[in-house]
Image (cartoon, grey):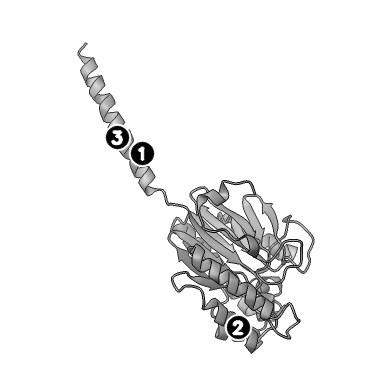
């Protein structure tokens, strides 16, 4: 008899506390946001370096749509041009990229057509002079993007010191991310580690198996679950444990059945999802409804 009023008060207090905890949890949950990955604009590829009007048309169309869609950021995963060091192609890439609204960060990634199939200290220096850093990190809210020079990973033979520096830097950045409690992160590079299977045979479109194994073990140790790449001029998907390897088709010249396009990524509390859209089917706006539909 005497305990019932206290029990009732306790129940009320418990409900209030639970409600406050639920509200705090809801307020603390980050809203999903969207980014766009494009790859291989590769100015000059369509005509084998004679001119680049088709690549210009594609890239300008992409920029106009990005200005309307307003993603949190844009990453162009390599092969910005078709011929290493070609000034006209480089200038055109910069000219069209500058059409993107300044409020939308654009991150360029080094491809093999930008630094050479076998990079050298000289080719790396030229790239850095015209495009900036070839490996770096960026942040968008609580999200961490790690940009790598995959040509240094695939073929380090002529730039061993640069390749070793990048790998040490990567380990340090992953350690820093773990210490900071970073929950959402992804790697962006040009050449995929693999297309479909982590143990697939070596080929032009992937990273050699021995090197691949070392990097995949490093990523697994630090909880890196997403890598976005290009290079293949087609879309491809693979997994290695919890890691998802996403290879995106080109905004430039396609080599498969899919058309030129871009990938929309959504970052949420549950992870990163993404969809590829041809340039003729670009979304009118970026929202969660895009990811509610079947792929």
Instruction: Measure the C-alpha gap from mark 2 to mark 3.
Output: 59 Å
- How many numbered discs sit on the rendered protein? 3
Name the residue that disc number 2 marks.
Answer: 92
- Image quadrant holding the N terminus, namely top left
- First reached walking from the N terminus: tag 2 or tag 3: 3
Instruction: Measure the C-alpha gap from mark 3 to mark 1.
Output: 9 Å
Name the residue that disc number 1 marks.
Answer: 22
| Residue 41 locus on image (x, y percent) | 65, 74
Of residue 254 and residue 228, the one placed in the foreground of this image is 254
Q: Do the CB atoms of the residues marked 3 and 1 lie less than 8 Å apart?
A: no
- First reached walking from the N terminus: tag 3 or tag 1: 3
The image shows residue 254, relative to residue 216, as above or below, that is below
CA neighbours of label 3 inside 10 A, class few (<14), some (14 to 19), many (20+): few
Name the residue that disc number 3 marks.
Answer: 17
* Element type at mark 2: helix
Residue at (45, 74) in percent of width and height: 102
| Residue 104 locus on image (x, y percent) | 47, 69
| Residue 179 locus on image (x, y percent) | 45, 58
* Element type at mark 3: helix
Of residue 228 and residue 234, the one placed in the foreground of this image is 234
Residue at (52, 64) in percent of width and height: 145
Q: Is residue 80 visible?
A: no
| Residue 254 locus on image (x, y percent) | 73, 68
């Amino acid at each position: 008899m005497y305990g019932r009023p206290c029990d009732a008060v306790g129940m009320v207090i418990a409900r209030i506390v639970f409600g406050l905890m639920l509200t705090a949890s809801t307020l603390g949950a980050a809203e999903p946001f969207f980014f766009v990955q494009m790859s291989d604009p590769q100015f000059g590829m369509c005509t084998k370096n004679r001119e680049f009007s088709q690549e210009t048309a594609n890239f300008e169309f992409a920029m106009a749509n990005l200005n309307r869609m307003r993603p949190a950021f844009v990453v162009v995963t390599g092969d910005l041009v078709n011929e290493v060091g070609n000034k006209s192609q480089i200038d055109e890439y910069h000219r069209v990229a500058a059409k993107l609204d300044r409020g939308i960060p654009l991150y360029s990634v080094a491809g093999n057509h930008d630094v050479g199939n076998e990079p050298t200290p000289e080719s790396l220096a030229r790239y850095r002079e015209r495009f900036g850093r070839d490996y770096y990190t960026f942040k968008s809210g609580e999200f961490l993007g790690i940009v790598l020079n995959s040509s240094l990973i695939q073929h380090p033979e002529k730039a061993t010191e640069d390749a070793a520096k990048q790998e040490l830097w990567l380990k340090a950045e992953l350690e820093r991310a773990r210490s900071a409690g970073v929950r959402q992160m992804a790697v962006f590079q040009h050449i995929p580690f693999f297309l479909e299977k982590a143990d697939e045979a070596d080929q032009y479109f992937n990273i050699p198996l021995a090197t691949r194994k070392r990097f995949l073990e490093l990523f697994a140790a630090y909880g890196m679950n997403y890598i976005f790449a290009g290079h293949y001029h087609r879309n491809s998907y693979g997994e290695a444990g919890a890691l998802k390897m996403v290879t995106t088709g080109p905004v430039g010249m396609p080599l498969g059945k899919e058309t030129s396009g871009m990938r929309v990524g959504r970052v949420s509390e549950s992870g990163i999802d993404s969809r590829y859209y041809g340039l003729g089917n670009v979304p009118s706006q970026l929202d969660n409804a895009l990811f509610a539909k079947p792929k």
